[in-house]
Image (spheres, helix red, strand yellow):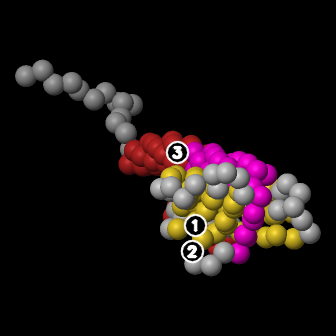
Amino acid sequence: MNMKRIHKGQRGLTIIELLVVIILTGLITTAITTTFFQVFNMNIRTTNHMSAISQVQQAGKLVSEDILEAQVLDDSPAGGEFLVLGWNSTPSREVIYTLEDGELWREETIGGGAPTTTRVAEYIDSEQTSCVWSSGVLTFTVTATVGAGTWGEESETRIYRVQPRPGT
């Protein structure tokens, strides 16, 4: 049998040295894990914020364009309708905006034909989104909230002030 002999002055790891190594390994692992989750969380928050910005910009663009072109405006329609716009042209044209379950919808009817419905934006906060007609200017405030819980809920609000064509 070939066994190594421990010479005087040679020794193995002590319990204290072993505990120090375990503690240092734990601290390094914790730091790496924390950094990873912070980067991951920041990435999700950034993605959510960019999505919210995109949704409010899309809503603002379409609503503003329609308001600028419309000849008839109703910013407080009955029912679930959010905004009703009309044109006195031939053929007649009507655009109705509705806000349902966090989605802004646009329904366009031309000349009494079948309506065309498109989703304008999603993640829209109905409590913070409004149209207010005052002093010849329609103020359209839209808020989108994307994400939930601990992974980074992000909101974006934009206010569009649009002065419709004269006589609207």
For the residue pair 155 and 151, the one nearer the viewer reads as 155
Q: Is residue 105 visible?
A: yes
* Amino acid type indicated by mark 1: Leu
Q: Residues within 10 Å of mark 3 (few under 14, many from 20)?
A: few
Counting residues from the start of the chain, the first of labels 1 and 2 encountered is 2
- Nearer to us: label 3 or label 1: 1
Residue at (83% x, 57% y) in the render: 164
* Amino acid type indicated by mark 2: Gly
Q: Residue furthest right?
A: 135
- Where is residue 97 shown, x and y percent of the image? 61, 62
Residue identified by numbered label 1:
99
User: For the residues marked 3 and 2, what is the alpha-carbon distance in whole angstroms?
Assistant: 39 Å
For the residue pair 104 and 122, the one nearer the viewer reads as 104
Labelled disc at residue 80: 2
Quarter location, residue 167: bottom right
Q: Residue furthest top?
A: 2
User: For the residues marked 1 and 2, what is the alpha-carbon distance in whole angstroms?
Assistant: 7 Å
Q: Secondary structure at mark 3?
A: helix
47 vs 8: above or below: below
Q: Secondary structure at mark 2?
A: loop
Residue identified by numbered label 3:
40
Q: Which residues are magenta?
A: 47-76
* Amino acid type indicated by mark 3: Phe
